[in-house]
Amino acid sequence: MLWSGWGDPAKARELPEQVRRLLHDFLGVRAPGTAAVALESVRLPPVALPGPLLEALAKIVGSAHVLTSHEARVRHTRGKSTPDLLRMRTGDGSDAPDAVVLPGSHEEVAELLRVCSAERVAVVPFGGGTSVVGGLAAARSGFAGVIALDLGRLDRLLSVDLESLVASFEPGVRAPEAERLLAGRGLTLGHFPQSFEYATLGGFAAARSSGQASAGYGRFDDMVMGLTVATPSGTLDLGRAPKSAAGPDLRQLVLGSEGAFGVITSLRLRVRRAPAERRYEGWRFGTFAEGSAAVRALAQEGPLPTVLRLSDETETMIGLAKPDAIGSGGSGGSGCLLIAGYEGAFAAERQAAASAVLERTGGEPLGAEPGEAWEHGRFSAPYLRDSLLAAGATVETLETAGFWANLPRLYDAVRLALAGALGSPLVMCHISHVYETGASLYFTVVTAQEGDPVEQWERAKAAASAAIVEAGGTITHHHGVGREHRDAYAAELGPVGVSVLQAVKARLDPAGILNPGVLVPPAGPA
């Protein structure tokens, strides 16, 4: 993973001239952004942990697995939000951990938490490093130091129950490796978020990830049958059956907890038979409202495709559903592009039945090419962001979700808030996660960098977050809370809900060492 951007540096691409002209003429981008400093030039604070404490950590995991090198600390600094990358590009490594510690077992994780609690060392669980909401920048105040708890050594497939279709994994398994291991047994998780190439299974659970095929396979939290979690107060082993009436389901307390309550050390996940057939296609609708009605019909009446994505007029015109083709000539066309994908048994029959619904609701079939182009470039958009940042544009994403009846209000509110904060930005949106009762809205925003681009985006994000809360949406559908969404999350929960979170945190993590500042709002004065 590129430390100052996204993914494999070899996959980076230059912006086509057509895109550069668009940036100049439409958004007023005039000057290239500041080039990233060299890795060795990133400014880091001195290691705050004393030698004896580092030795105590090394005694638990082995000296080879406690890293304090400049490179290791840089590569575990922050996540991959646009503010994260803008700070890293300028050489600001002020949030770097003092050490990177790589445990090799549940027992080592538990012992590390015991020692860090006693010594007041903050612990940031680290999987793929793909957080885009400030989920990897711990608050240092009141702590002796900060460690990044890299779970990369916990990378095994532990067991596969072919009868129940449940597979047990350690949390550090990256998504492509999980699919490779399962494919050998004819299975799949079916979880393919945009972070797929680098994110880990533990990270998916901790952030309530939702993949591009969620219409067919469900969100990641739907797949979690059980968890083992190390906390400073002891071990949680959750999930004896698929469903239970034995009180509140504590699995749901861990899912989405972002490392603030404990460290996931194993997961038991529902898997499915790998599909023998995949079909993708495109449809065009005249307006976003018409396309949304068609998507709602599929969600409520069926049959629901495995993949279902609807771009609004702006996203369709730019061609963001096909990021590999942006700037290659022409535009994405008029109206709104819908991508549908069908996998597994009876794919052709489900495609025919869904097509009948899409035709009845006003859709124009475009054939397989748009769908196959989307499938080919489905993980490419973050690379485009790096190129746009380098060209002098600020580009970032945000997302929300709401009930169908409220979705138009939510869509308009976010767009108006972004325009008010940024002037004349390019704001694109798509629906990509649908339910019988509602859907997500995923916005991509591009604007010219002005002054301090971090402050520029933080101002816009604050306006959009306030608009989401006011319009009745959730502050996040699948990116998580982190630090960026914490205050809006508190407003969404209300004071009683916040006090419940704080009570859970105090019981499981009495010293408050786990990802401090993330997810859980701080307790106010009594």
Image (tube, helix red, strand yellow):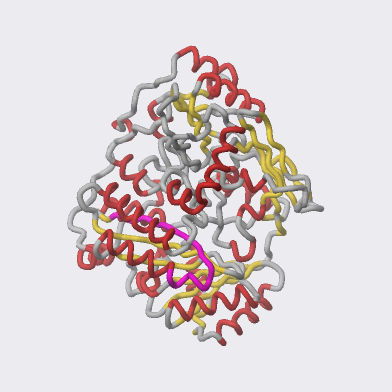
Vertical arrangement, residue 71 with respect to residue 473, above or below = above
Tell whether 289 sits left or right of 214. left
Determine if the magenta segment contains residue 65.
Answer: no
Q: Residue 152: percent from the left, percent from the top?
A: 56, 35
Residue 359 appears at what percent x and percent y?
55, 86
351 up-or-down from 449: above or below: below
Q: Which quadrant of the view contains residue 141?
A: top left
Which of the two residues, 429 or 326, is positioned nearer the viewer here?
429
Query: How far across and down, in percent of the image, does residue 213 sit?
Result: 58, 62
- Please identify the residue farthest to the top as the structure is shown: 52
- Seen from the viewer's position, the closer of residues 356 and 222 is 222
Q: Residue at x 55, y 47 (%)?
A: 496
Q: Residue at x 37, y 51 (%)?
A: 12
The one of 180 and 145 positioned closer to us in this rendering: 145
Foreground: 249 or 203?
249
Compared to residue 6, the image places residue 364 above or below, namely: below
Is residue 7 in view? no
> In the image, what residue occupies the spot 74% across and 48% down?
247
Q: Is 405 in the magenta?
A: yes
Dominant secondary-structure state across the stretch colored magenta: strand
Q: Is residue 417 left or right of residue 297?
A: left
What range is drawn magenta here? 394-409
Residue 359 vs 197, above or below: the answer is below
Image position, residue 178 (x, y; %) = 63, 47
